[in-house]
Image (cartoon, helix red, strand yellow):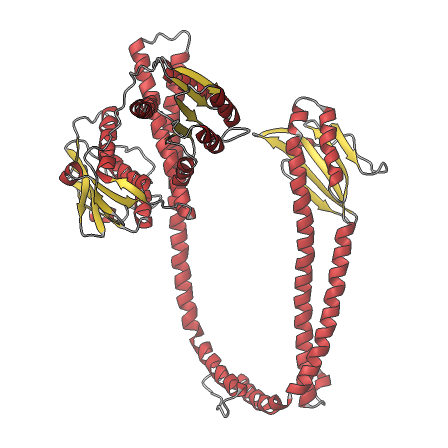
Amino acid sequence: MKVFQNISIKNKIISIILLVSTITMLIGFTIVGIGDIKSLKQEMLLNNLMNTKLIGEYSIAPLTFDDNIGAENILSKLSAIPGVKCGALYDRNGFLFASYKRTEDVFIPPLYENPDELVESFNEFTKTFLKIEHPIIYEDFKYGIISIQVDTSLLTKKTRDTILIMLGILIGMIIFSYILANRLQKPISQPILELAKLTRKISGEGDYNVRIERKSNDEIGILYEDFNNMLQQILNREAARDEADKKLLEAKEKAEESDHLKSAFLANMSHEIRTPMNAILGFAELITMPDSEIAPAEKENFVKLINNSGNNLLRLIDDIIDISKIEAGQIKIHKKECHLNSTLKDIQQSFLEIRKHKEKENIDIRLNENAQTQNLVIKTDPLRLNQIFINLIDNALKFTEDGFIEFGYEILNKEKFLFYVKDTGVGMDRAKKDLVFDRFTKIEDDSSRLYRGAGLGLAISKSLVELLGGEIWVESAPSVGSTFYFNLPFDIIKESDNNLQIIELSDNYDWQNKTILVAEDEPANYIYIEKVLKTTKARVLKAMNGKEAVEMYKNNRDIDIIIMDIKMPEMDGYEATRQIKKINKNIPIISQTAYAMPGDIDKGLDSGMNDYLIKPVKPKVLLSILNKHLNKLSRTG
């Protein structure tokens, strides 16, 4: 840099500003240019890779049924994609199955060498074209390989235009920088010389305790002050670095602990899923073995075990889905009127049945006095309130071998309820109380006994209580029992009448003169419903989709009630319900669907459905819901 020794400070400042500006802009434009070019290439690659995968998926059927003509027709769709020169479809052995050429001078190899080595998408940019090769895999079976070549001339043109535009902008900014530096350097020259003199002194002596005296309140004065602050920061740097290293170590330990908990959780999930699956598959195979010498009583017991294992697996899946939605922030609260005491009584009846299956009939499951005597209607999310209670009572039943489980509520004030679930189970010490609501944590005090479950119920309950605007805690003592409390705000409270309808579960109905239309596109589901309804002697009609259900109702006005699936071809259950309700607004329509979220339930009710059943549907529940609405028809008819 000797060239700067004999020129003025003005030219030095201008030269340095121009040099720094030019280098900075050059680096910036280079980075931006490279990024833009990469983005163009990535956009081209993603678009063509998506089209390749889509055409590959469409080609599964022709490859499966050896339909060359169908495959050729599918590949011909490449002509609509700009720039595609050719495409080839190879079977799983590497032989050419179908091809497409935009021009006849393109050569397509008749054999794909080493097809088994291609296990994922491969792409390669050359000077003139982009080559994409993609394995066609469905349900872990490789049907073949699809390969396309795309002309990159358009990408080259866009790249050239981008570079020319950036060069023009760079030259213009250099000229502008020169004009600006020439005008603004004068009030800066002298203060910079003083600053340079002092900085050389500090640099030479290494004394960071030296400070620059501030002589003005303009930008240079601020620069002096900032320089002094920088010197102080250098002195404090070592202390700050030590503190940062300490925090980094703590964060690393927390991350390792979280990873360990998740690994343990996944291992436990594998065990908890395989355990009921083993019972389901094992006992099902025993029942269906032709040479099996199993007494009818044993078969009936096997069916109960299969049913219990299926329910356990379903609860586990629901917990996994809920915890995933909670972590992703996708749980929505839908507040509506909730008959509180009726809800709690239904939960009690449900757990009295569960108690039998778990062979714990010696445990008294009871409601407190408020839950038995009052009839309150509050505004909250009934589904989530029900879920919280079920998780807490299920947890209590798991850890209680004798005594009682009591649950209910107290009214704290005009704005909050205090709910609780109390048990006489094993209890826990203070250390466990701090961990009991943590995710991926499963507490088992007794190493000699294995308690089934994923350890998610309490974590889910805590998250749901907080989403509802409350808080949850536990009081417990070892060998005495535990009491889980949670409070919730409510918007409306009123006394309801004492004639709340309680659905009685039964499987003995006589609907000999009734006609039931079942709209269901899945044969297995229809057969199940048909077998359940067979005992009622009702006449059952079948519709394969929503459109067919509407037509059948138009032609069979003696239909008394409709069971409507939601997801069906041609017309879904929502639209079918709306159209049938236009014909007869009084016809009861019951949805039966796997869509179990509150928003989906509200959507069905808004479309005109009178009630809903969530798959898997139990026979007694199905019959009871149908009986409730058929009785309403009898009273109004």
Q: Report the residue that reaches farthest toward the right.
A: 105
The reply, left or right, for residue 292 in relation to residue 148 is left
Front-most of residues 392 and 377: 377
Q: Classify residue 119 by image quadrant.
A: top right
Q: Identify the image quadrant of the N terminus.
A: bottom right
Q: How many marks?
A: 0
**In this rendering, is residue 31 above or below 135?**
below
Q: Residue at x 37, y 45 (%)?
A: 261
Q: Identify the image quadrant of the C terminus.
A: top left
Residue 441: x and y, percent? 32, 43
Q: Classify residue 588 by image quadrant.
A: top left
Q: Residue at x 31, y 48 (%)?
A: 468
Front-most of residues 413 and 229: 413
**In this rendering, is residue 288 above or below 163?**
above
Residue 164 visible in the picture = yes
Residue 60: x and y, percent? 64, 28
Q: Classify residue 16 by image quadrant.
A: bottom right
Residue 217: x and y, percent? 49, 89
Q: Residue at x 42, y 38 (%)?
A: 603
Q: Report the residue that reaches farthest toward the front.
A: 637
**In this rendering, is residue 562 above or below 103?**
above
